[in-house]
Amino acid sequence: MTLEKIGIVIISLSLMMVSSPAFADSGDDTEGLKKEIGILKERLNALEARLQKSDAKAVEMEKMPMEGVPAAITSFAKEIEVHGSVDTAYIFNTSTPVSPNARTNNLRVFDTEANGFMLHLAELNFEKTISQESPVGFRVDLSYGKDAEIFDAAGLGSGTDEFDLQQAYAQFYVPFSLPFMHALNFRLGKYVTLHGAEVIESVDNWNHSRSLLFGYAIPFTHTGLRAYYRPVEDWPVDAYIGIVNGWDNVSDNNRAKSIEAMFCYTPFDSLSLTVAGMFGPERAGSNEDFRNLIDTVVTFKPFDRLTLKANYDFGWEDNGASATAGSAFEKDAAWDGIAGYAKYDIFDWWSVAGRGEYFHDRDGVRTGQLTSATMPMTDVEIAEFTLTNEFKLYNNLITRLEYRYDKASGQVYTKDKITANHQSTIAAEVIYKF
C-alpha cells in the first residue's frame, strides 16, 4: 500500500470518528469540529487527486517502450516464456566397478558414473507458444551437463561436448480453417522424438534413471519438419507426421530421409493410447537399408493418486548386424522390449514410483555388445527393476532416493575388476526447476 493510500485511510477514519455522536457536542466544540472536518476533507481531496495522477502516470509508463528499445521488441519479449531446471545426483554402485579409464555403470543411459556426483543437466528454455490468436512461435532449449554428451546429435558439436542445443524450432498454425481441420500446425527445426514413455529431462519423469527402452530402443531427437493435426475440437484424436534427417543427427548421413508418425487416442481423461512409428535408412552412406520402429504407450489413471503406464517397442534394421560387425555377409538386426510403470502419490509432497522392464537386443547391436572388444555377444537380454521415492520439499525443489537392480543374460557388467551379470545402484537426486 502506498503512502497516499495510507493517508487516505487515516483521514477517512478520522472523519468517521469526528462525525460520530460521541464527538457531536453543542456550542463552540461543534463549530471547532466542523472546521476540523473541513480541513480534513480538503486534505483528503488533495491526496485523492495526487493518487489519481500517480496511477495514471504508472499506466502510461507501462505502455511506453523501454528507453532506446522499439515498442515491437518489448511487446514480443513479453510473450516469451522462460523456464529451466538444474539436475544433480550422487550414484553409488554396490559392485564398485573399476575400469582402466573410469568408474562406470554399464548399460545405463544418463546415470553412467559410479560412486560420484554428477551434474546431469542444467537447462534453459525459451518459448513463445502458439494459438489461433497468436499463430507464430518458437522454442529453444539450451542444455549443459553430462547428459548432453549422450543425447548430443551428430553434426552439432563434438561427441564429448557437454553443451547441446537440444531443441531449436519455429512453429506456426495454418492460417485458415476447413471442415475436419480444427488444428493444424507445423514445427521446423530440431526437436525431441515422439517415441517412448520417458523424456530427456528427469524432472518430467517418475524415476531418476532412464529405462533401457529409452536408452537403446528409440532415438532422442530429430531435425526436420513435423505436422500436428486435430480434426475436430471435441474428438479425442490427435495425429503427428513428419519427415526428418534420421535418428539423432542434425546433418544427414545419407541422401534419404526418414518418416515419423504418431496416433493419439484419449477416450477419457483417465486413459490414453499412443501408437508411433518410424522408418527410413539410417546407415551412413546407404539409402536402401531401412531402420524401422514401432512404439506403443498406454497410460491409465484408475483413481486420483495412482497412475499406471506401459511401453512396448519393437525395432529392426536391414543388414544392421552385418554393418555393425563389419562382416562380409548380410545380417539383419532386431530388438524389442516392454516396460511397466506405477506411481502412487502418498501425499502431495511424497510419491513412490516403480518400474520393471525387459529388453532383448537380439543381435547385440543396440547395446554395443556386438562390437565389444572384450566379450562380443550377439544376443543380450536384460531385465531391471527400479523403485523411486520422490519428495517435494518446496514447489520448485524435488529430491529423489532410488534403488535399481539390473540382471543380464551375459557378463555385461563389472564387479570390482571382473565381469558380472548384474549390478545394483542407489541414487540420491536433487532437481531445482523454475
Image (spheres, rainbow, N blue to C red):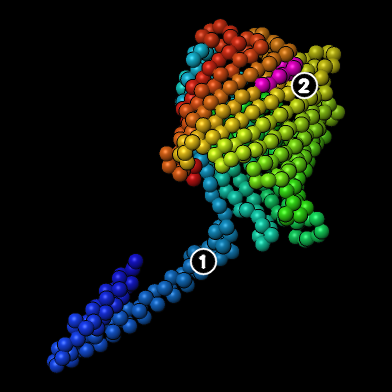
Q: Which residue is mark 2?
A: 334
* SS class, disc 2: strand
Residue 6 in view (yes/no): yes
Q: Which mark is drawn over residue 125?
A: none
Q: Which quadrant: the N terminus?
A: bottom left
Q: Residue furthest left?
A: 28
Q: First in sequence: mark 1 or mark 2?
A: 1
In the drawing, does residue 279 fall left or right of residue 250?
right
- Label 1 with label 2: CB-CB less than 8 Å: no
Which region shows up in magenta?
A: 358-365
Q: Which mark is drawn over residue 65?
A: 1
Q: Position of residue 215 (x, y in %)?
A: 64, 27
Q: Position of residue 285 (x, y in %)?
A: 80, 27
Q: Amino acid at mark 2?
A: Ala
In the drawing, does residue 140 fall left or right of residue 235?
left
Query: Quadrant of residue 142 in the image?
Result: top right
